[in-house]
Each structure stands twice: as C-alpha cells, then as structure tokens.
Image (spheres, helix red, strand yellow):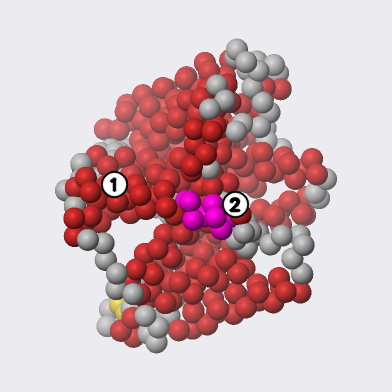
C-alpha cells in the first residue's frame, strides 16, 4: 500500500463535506414534504435521521484535528503556559459565540430597541471584528481598535437584548450553549486531557470509556443528570473518539505500519456500529436530542468509516481536486458556519422570501443544496480578501 503522509489531506476534505452538509440540513429544515430520513428524528422517536449524524461527525473531526494542532505548537517550542492559554482562548471564543447565538433564539423584538435581524447581524459582524485572521502586515494599532470596537458592540448588544418568559422581561441568560458552545466545552476538556496526558493512548482510551460509561449509566437508569462542563458526557466522548483515531493513525505511521490502518479503522467502525445497535434497547434507543449512548457510538462508527473512505480517496488516490468547489469549508470552517446568519437575517431584514415552490419537496431540497454551495463560495471569496475567522 502507498505510504501515508504524516498530515492527512483527507481531514480537510472530510471537514469540508461535513460543513457543507451542516449548512444543507439547517437550510432544508423549513422545507415541507421532503423524505423523512433527511431531517432530524423527533424527540419521541427511537431513530436516526441523516441530519442527526452531521453534528457528531463534526465533533469527531474536531477530535481528529486536535492532536495535530497541539503537537504543532509543541514542536514550535510553545511553553506549557502558552499552549494552555491557546486552549483556553479558543474555548472561550466558541463559548462566547455560542452564548450569543443561543440567546438569539429567544430574542423578542417587541421588547427590544433593535429588530431581531439587526441584532443578529451586528453580533455576527462583531465576531468577525474580534476573531478575524488579521494578516501579519495589518497594523497592530488598527487591529486592536477594531477588536475593541467588536467587544463594545457585543456589550451594547447584551445591554439592548430583551426576551420574555413567565410574564417577565429578562436580558441575556444561559440556557444551553448552542452548537459552538458545545464544541467549546468539549474541545476544552479533550484538549486539556490530551495535553496533560501527553497524548498517551491508554489514558485517552480510559477517559473515553469513563465518559461513555457515564452517559450509558444515565440512560440505563432513566435519570436526567448533567455535570458542569461535560454535561452528559456525549460531546466529550465524540471528540475523544476522534482524538483516539488520530493518535492511532500517528502511531501506525510512525511505526511504519500504515497498511494496518485499514484493519483498525474497519474494526473500530464496524464494532461501534454493532455495539450501538446492541445497547439500543437498554439505553433509551437511538436519539440525538437525548444524546443516548447508541447515538454516540453509531455516529462514531459512521464517521470512522467515512474517514477511512476519504483517506483512501484523497491521500491514497490523490482525488482532492474533486472537492475543490467546497474547499473553503474545510479551511475556513468557522467562517462558513457563520455565513447562514448573514443570509437568513439579511433576508428577514428586507422581508425577502423565496418563491413558494422552493419551500416544498425536490425544489426546496435543490434550493438548500444551492444555498450551501453559494455560502461556501462566498466564504472562499472572503478568504481571498483575508476575511476569515481564526481562533
């Protein structure tokens, strides 16, 4: 078998495909009369919709990428304090963005000065101002002024925010942390475990089993339990699953056993699928909404097999150019994730709606496919002008 590179190009492609699908499933959610399997399964269902596999895949990919990023900083000679600061600052950025986006869901324009669309757009612009990947040639003073202005915008938006509940008007408050917040907490826990364990496989595997066991015990006993930071352990288990696969790859390549990778990935992928199906009747079925252990390990299995496929297609067969049209989603991923906030709220601000035909059936699905391509293409144009987020 062809010797695999030490840095897999397939990770960027897998991330790009996953982000494309994330934009697609979010956009298609308001389309009626589409095949049931495309959408999320309902909370009452013991089922797995296609949309239910996308976010866990993204968490798994966060885990795959994590060791590469931290090891790169170690090789550069970053101090322990610098690496921990890097981990904390990335996590904080994701938590802040997630916190604002979750509160956006409950924003009430009736009690607020700004329309919801204006508030959402200003907050998203502030994210770019603060966490833009400023070129090294960009004047530091100007950069700091823009970043401070972005922080001030977020503060003002927090002051202006109003929502209502139980006959009272309130400001911003924590409920859940949103997609970005969940990524932030999971990344924080897994990055610290990886760094302080020095990436030792046995320690990582033990931690993964602890989080899986914790989540399984919750659903086996039919109790509701959430711990600070780790929640029910599901998201951390998904990220740690990716970390373990990444470390397995690094070990096999270093040991000159690249050919064994296929056996290992097949074993992990198929066995986790079978385990998920086996424990399904005893742990409240398969449910993304309830974060059941069956959902966790089945999604790990699916993503592991998808990762194996892309390793073969991209790193062995060299077909990366096949995915050039969505490449920005693999390198400017956070930018792509935020693009729908501009799209959705600009349309709402100017009261623009698609023709009725595009809210139904196949035309609606095609609309969502087109929107996904369009937003990624726009993110690519922004990237060329150094308008990309980096945390």
Secondary structure at badge 1 equals helix
Residue depth check, mark 2 versus mark 1: number of the one nearer the observer: 1
Residue segment shown in magenta: 376-383
Q: Residue sitting at 35 percent across and 49 percent down?
A: 370
Q: Residue 391 in the image: x percent, y percent?
A: 63, 56
Q: Residue 319 in the image: x percent, y percent?
A: 53, 27
234 vs 126, nearest the viewer: 126
Left or right, 315 with reference to 374: right
362 vs 80, nearest the viewer: 362
Distance from disc 2 to disc 1, alpha carbons, whole Å, reads 37 Å
Rendered view: 3 above or below 147 = above
Give the main secondary structure, helix, strand or loop, of the magenta stretch: helix
Q: Residue 153 in the image: x percent, y percent?
A: 55, 78
Quick one: label 1, few (<14), some, or many (20+) residues within 10 Å?
Answer: some
Whether residue 55 can be seen here: no
Q: Which mark is residue 188?
A: 2
Q: Quadrant of the N terminus?
A: top right
Q: Residue sitting at 40 percent across and 63 percent down?
A: 343
Rendered view: 380 above or below 17 = below
Q: Is residue 284 magenta?
A: no
Q: Could you say which quadrant of the image residue 330 lies in? A: top right
Quick one: label 2, few (<14), some, or many (20+) residues within 10 Å?
Answer: many
Left or right, 219 with reference to 364: right
Q: Which residue is mark 1?
A: 366
Q: Which mark is residue 290?
A: none
Q: Is residue 381 magenta?
A: yes
337 vs 350, nearest the viewer: 350
Q: How many marks?
A: 2
């Amino acid at each position: 078998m062809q010797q695999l590179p030490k840095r897999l190009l397939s990770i960027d492609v897998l991330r790009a495909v996953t982000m494309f699908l994330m934009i697609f499933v979010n956009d298609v959610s308001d389309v009626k009369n589409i095949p049931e399997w495309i959408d999320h399964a309902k909370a009452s269902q013991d089922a797995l919709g296609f949309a239910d596999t996308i976010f866990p895949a993204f968490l798994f990919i966060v885990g795959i990428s994590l060791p590469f990023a931290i090891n790169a900083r170690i090789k550069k000679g970053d101090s322990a304090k610098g690496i921990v600061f890097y981990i904390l600052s990335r996590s904080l950025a994701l938590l802040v963005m997630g916190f604002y986006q979750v509160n956006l869901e409950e924003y009430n324009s009736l009690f607020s000065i700004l329309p919801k669309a204006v508030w959402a757009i200003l907050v998203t612009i502030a994210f770019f101002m603060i966490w833009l990947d400023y070129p090294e040639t960009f004047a530091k003073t100007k950069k700091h002024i823009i970043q401070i202005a972005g922080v001030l915008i977020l503060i003002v938006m927090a002051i202006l925010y109003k929502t209502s509940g139980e006959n009272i008007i309130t400001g911003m408050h924590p409920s859940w942390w949103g997609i970005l917040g969940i990524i932030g907490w999971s990344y924080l826990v897994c990055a610290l475990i990886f760094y302080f364990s020095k990436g030792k496989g046995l320690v990582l595997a033990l931690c993964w089993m602890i989080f899986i066991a914790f989540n399984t015990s919750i659903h086996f006993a039919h109790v509701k339990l959430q711990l600070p930071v780790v929640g029910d352990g599901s998201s951390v288990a998904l990220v740690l699953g990716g970390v373990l696969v990444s470390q397995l790859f690094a070990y096999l390549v270093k040991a000159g056993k690249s050919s064994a990778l296929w056996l290992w990935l097949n074993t992990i992928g198929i066995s986790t699928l079978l385990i998920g199906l086996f424990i399904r009747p005893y742990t409240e079925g398969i449910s993304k909404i309830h974060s059941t252990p069956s959902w966790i390990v089945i999604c790990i299995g699916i993503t592991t097999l998808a990762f194996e496929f892309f390793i073969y297609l991209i790193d062995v067969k060299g077909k990366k150019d096949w995915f050039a049209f969505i490449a920005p989603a693999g390198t400017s991923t956070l930018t792509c994730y935020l693009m729908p906030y501009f799209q959705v709220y600009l349309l709402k601000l100017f009261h623009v709606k698609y023709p009725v035909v595009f809210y139904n059936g196949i035309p609606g699905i095609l609309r969502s496919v087109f929107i996904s391509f369009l937003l990624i293409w726009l993110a690519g144009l922004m990237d060329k002008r150094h308008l990309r987020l980096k945390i």
